[in-house]
Image (spheres, rainbow, N blue to C red):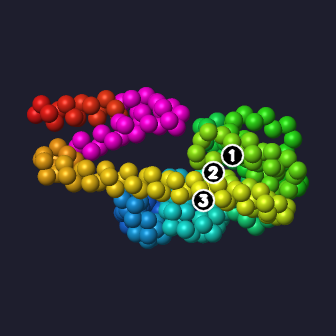
Amino acid sequence: MVSKIYKIIFFCLIIFYQNVSNSKSLESKSFDEKNVYNYFSALVAQDNNNIYESLKFFDSSKHLKESHQSYIKKYIYSLVLSGKINKAVNEIKTIKNKEFIDFFEAQLLLVLYSLKKDDYKKSLDYINDLKRHEEEGTFELIVSSFLEEYVYLFNQKKIKPNLEGQFGKLSLINRALQSCYLGQPNTETLFDELTNFNDEGDSRYLFFYANYLISKNNFFKAKNIFKNVMSRGKQIFWVGGTLSYIIYIIVVWGFTKAPIPMVGALRETSIFFSIFIGYFFLKEKITSKKIFTIILILVGVVGLKLF
């Protein structure tokens, strides 16, 4: 009886020793000198915007994928920046430790990929994981909220009810595009409201508006939109092009009358005037950053004169 007990204890010790040895061998395999060197080389290449070089080093240190949480995040960034979206999604899906991919960008990729594949059931699952990161910042909140609306739109073929418009103009843009997608009768009203904003950048949505009008055979209104765009474009071209040419002539003339560094520095004061033109004529806001920039410019001009 005693001999049997000794045998059992001895057998257990052997199994325990083998498990410890295997875990140590796996750990040493992941964190050996070569893997660490390749990983840090990948990080350096990534910081230097040498994406393809960083991918080469990431691929050479893939043993770290299941043991080092920061590795998979940096690796996915490089894959996305190099345009290898399918591979990035595959890496996210195949990783064993799901805690390693519990970050906003990874969940965002899964949502977008499932939408591309028209797999709306999966999209709903992924959007719930994405929304867990809403509190990380305003960007995460807006992106996850809008994607949730579009998942609902594509799945139910209708606009999600009870939208409060909490994001102001962004909500209006979103609502106009969704109405355009469904061909709803209020689309024209929403686009008219959107393009009547004082912001010059709203003209970019005229393309969607004109395309919607053409699909509804409203060629007359679509033609007027294109005429207005062309007219506005010509004005910007002639006025802006002429002023730029005159300014360039003045700067070249200045080079013949004063030291080039002085003229070059004074030329940058155009930022100062641009801020005030934007405020008085384009109704842009003057922020604390802009004020700080103005102060730096004035200090630089005074410094050039004194020293």
- Amino acid type for the residue under numbered disc 2: Ser
- Closer-to-camera residue (70/21): 70
Name the residue nearer the viewer: 180 or 66: 180
Circles 1, 2 touching at the beta carbon (< 8 Å): yes
- Dot 1, how many residues are within 10 Å of its Cα: few (below 14), some (14-19), or many (20+)? some
Secondary structure type for disc 3: helix
> Looking at the image, is mark 1 or mark 3 earlier in the sequence?
1
Disc 3 marks which residue? 230
Q: Residues within 10 Å of mark 2 (few under 14, many from 20)?
A: some
Q: Mark 1 points at which residue?
A: 195
> SS at mark 2?
helix
Residue 203 is tagged as: 2
Ranked by sequence position, the earlier of labels 3 and 2 is: 2
Marks 3/2: CA distance?
11 Å
Q: Residue at x 64, y 64 (%)?
A: 89
Using the numbered discs, state the Cα–Cα distance from disc 1 to disc 2 in whole angstroms.
Answer: 6 Å
Q: Relative to 287, does residue 170 appear above or below in the rendering?
A: below
- In this image, 70 relative to 104: left or right? left
